[in-house]
Image (spheres, rainbow, N blue to C red):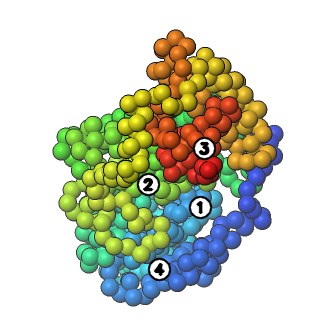
Amino acid sequence: VIFNTWDVAYVRDMAAAKKWLNDAEDVVEEMVEGVMAAHAGQLVKLKGYNVLLHRNIEVIKAGQVTILSGGGSGHEPAHAGYVGDGMISGAILGGVFASPSIDSVLAAIRAAAGPHGVLLVVKNYTGDRINFGQAALIAQTEGIRVATVIVADDCALPEGKGITGGRGVAGTVLVHKVAGAAAQAGLALEAVAAEATNAAETVKTLGVAMTTCTVPGSAPSGRLDAETIEIGLGIHGEPGMKQSPLRKCDELVDEMITVINGRAKLVAGDDVAVMINNLGGTPTMELYLVARKAVLAVAALTGTPPARVYVGSFMTALEMAGVSISLLKLDPLLAARLDAATSAPAWPTTGGPVAPLAELEPVVTSTDATAAAATAATAGGAPVVDSEALRRVCQALIEAETKLTEWDQIAGDGDCGITFRRGAEKVGHGPSFGRSSCPLSPTDIATSLDRPPTLAHPDYCRSGQLPRILRRGDTRGACNRHKCIHGRNVGCAP
């Protein structure tokens, strides 16, 4: 792991980060115990080592090539989460962000070796390459057939620059899947290695981090402030391509896809698998925002939506708030390997093949249709509000956002201020306000809120909900049955 001197000085003066720990020295061993407790029916631990093997390793190695992978801990669910039928046969765990020892790798090879040989899938880091490589050489002198595939999918560093080359990141998981499916199909070691190598050379990845990550027992880094992100920050906190001010999601995804496609070389007609990977601390909601834009960006390059889309936590960096995107150009064989069945608990059960987008038309009742027609025909019987008065209400709600949020954090869920502000901004900037200070009907207000005219439903208006909204700015009082403002069904007054 690389730190600059400013990081070191900052860390020295800070207290350790808050984490779920007993003792930082025991975190990996205790995590392994937890993994075994949760997946005892699928895994077996190699005694004396942090090595987790397929529960039926003796049967597996007798019938097919076995596949081992691993590396430093802190990237869960990688790599133990991918042990299962149709993926890897075992995972070798090092300390947090530290390569497993030569002894651990060698012990795993010996335990997993059968007549069909062992394939090592290794991420491109110096420690991993040395320790996995030395263990493979020793095993070969013992007569064990071992092949190695190196994954270097990270696009953060200039291609061809540097001594070590690109880093191995989330694309490694796709290599696991391809290699595991090929091995389960009965291919020989050389053929499995060839398919894994093809996947490793084809997949390309780039991550963007909003925060760094903190090794258990250490202090948080001040590398990124509240307004700064890092494009290409490594999964151990290594420096990336550049730091940048925080930007909108779509802008970041566009830049990520552009950088990745500088290596992936996608063109019209290509089938592509897209993996949206949570680097540890990103809400699922935001992952799907990234997925939305990534699908659009890939479709703009290829002319069709991606053939496979996987969204989730595949290879994390402790609590790093960030996302990586991996693109894998598919051929029929690669697609088949991704689609092959697996029992690995961390591989998603959804993701492909991707079906066409579909929308279902909402059910419109006769009551809704009658109310909409009556509203369109006349506003004579509907309540009206002076637009200038409503404008002042909206402005007051916007200015009160902070206080409303503060109160709601005490008494509720903390969304009150922003909910009122958004509603007030929509009403205050709606098209009806361009007509001087003429009275507004419920339909005018519904239009400003991008809601259907059933806001003016007779039952709704008679219930007194609309006047209360206008007096209090309370969009949460709207009735779900009548498709009203906020959509929370709190019931209509009789």
Side of 375 where 390 appears, left or right: right
CA–CA distance in space, label 1 to label 4: 18 Å
Instruction: Name the kind of residue labelled 2 in the image.
Output: Val
Q: Residue at x 74, y 42 (%)?
A: 408
Q: Position of residue 69 (x, y in %)?
A: 46, 66
Amino acid type at mark 3: Ser
- Counting residues from the start of the chain, the first of labels 4 and 3 encountered is 4
Residue 12 picture location, percent across and down: 79, 42
Tell me if mark 1 has few (under 14), some (14-19) or many (20+) residues whose alpha carbon lies within 10 angstroms of its own. many
In the picture of the structure, the residue carrying the numbered disc 3 is 463
Give the residue type at disc 1: Ser
Please tell me which of labels 2 and 1 falls first in the chain. Answer: 1
**Observer-nearest of 383 and 5:** 383
Q: Earlier in the sequence, mark 1 or mark 4?
A: 4
Q: Which residue is mark 1?
A: 73
- The residue identified by callout 4 is 54
Q: Earlier in the sequence, mark 2 or mark 3?
A: 2
Hey, what amino acid is under mark 4? His
Q: Judging from the image, what secondary structure is the residue with disc 3 in? A: helix
Q: Nearer the viewer, mark 4 or mark 2?
A: 2
CB within 8 Å, label 2 to label 3: no
How dense is the environment of label 4, judged by Cα within 10 Å: few (below 14), some, or many (20 and up)? many
User: Would residue 159 appear left or right of 98 to someone viewing this image?
Assistant: left
